[in-house]
Amino acid sequence: MPQHNTEAAPDSQSLPAPTTVQHGEEGVWLFIFGDMMFFGLFFVSFLFYRAGDPAGYDRSQILLNQSYGLGNTLLLLTSSWCVAQAVHAFRVADKSRCRLLLMLAIGMGIGFVLSKSFEWSGKFADGITVQTNEFFMFYFMLTGIHLIHVLLGIGVLCFVSNRVGGADNASNGSRCMVVLESGAAFWHLVDLLWVVLFALLYLVR
Amino acid sequence: MQLKQLLFSRITVIWLGLVGASCVSLELFRGVPSADLSRIGGGAVLVIAFTKCRYILLDFMELRDAPRPMRLFAELWCAGLGAFLVAALGTSWFGFGAA
């Protein structure tokens, strides 16, 4: 259940203090923030090494398919929309719509995995591997680590969807809300990281 | 929950904005031919990316009304990391990073 905190008002004449709400588990948020820091270091490292050979990085970047990158971005953004709406649907006790939206998000996640495997297999067919040069080392490493997050996220959404189906009373309903909010936050993290990866790997010159 | 509520919500407006911003980013990549302009284009692409991240954090991940440390982390990650990367791209900070 979301934890509500009301910050202390300076005096009784003041307007009511704003209420803050923490959605999801604290441990999940710690993991999410840690992961964001970890990826932040990756992003800085990428630009650091890029500065050593910008022309070489640009030549390699041209070999990527920007349309694939945009397609993947739209898939993840739309799946995030589905998950955010699923959380809202659960709050208004519309479990069937919640599950439907989660299933749609899972489907788009699977679409992302398929798209990424097509993209990678195209690169391998062209003789481009992780050892081709520094740019492609970063490309395969960063998209690979992100892909692991996507696969984990799909597993999390499947688990959450299953829990939503089993939430049949107020007690396990509130527990289910925490699980749903935590799972949703993780899925949005997957989307968030891809937004920066798309910009750095596919578009920044 | 009505379909109308689902489609005409703040989340949907933000999703549309994020989709539009992604398309604009790709057009910035395609529409910048010269090396000098590409650096500006690259900076703009990063600014758009971290602005998108802010909306994902605040609205999709619901940190807009989160406790102050959580909200602060989200804002600092977007503004701090985003500004650092844009500055590093636009200057020669990492010029010594030549392999």
Image (cartoon, rainbow, N blue to C red):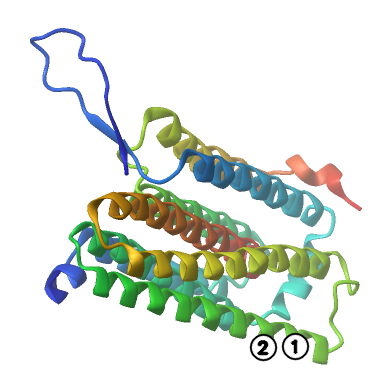
Asked where in the image residue B38 lies, by quadrant, the reply is bottom right
Relative to B58, say whether B46 is above or below. below
Identify the residue at image location x=50%, y=43%.
A29
Label 2: which residue?
A118
Q: At numbered mark 2, what does the secondary structure look like: helix, strand or loop?
A: helix
Asked where in the image residue A167 lies, by quadrant, the reply is bottom left
In the rendered structure, which amino acid carries the disc numbered 1?
A: Ser
**Circle 2 Cα neighbour tier, 10 Å, few/some/many (<14 / 14–19 / ≥20):** few
Label 1: which residue?
A121
Q: Position of residue A30 (x, y in %)?
A: 55, 39
Tag count: 2
Q: Quadrant of the C terminus of chain A?
A: bottom right
In the rendered structure, which amino acid carries the disc numbered 2?
A: Phe
**Circle 1 Cα neighbour tier, 10 Å, few/some/many (<14 / 14–19 / ≥20):** some
Task: Say if residue A92 shows up in the picture.
Answer: yes
Relative to B94, say whether A4 is above or below. above
Tag 1 subunit: A
Same subunit under labels 2 and 1? yes
Relative to B40, say whether A120 is above or below. below
Identify the residue at image location x=18%, y=60%.
A92
Is label 2 in contact with label 1 (beta carbons under 8 Å)? yes
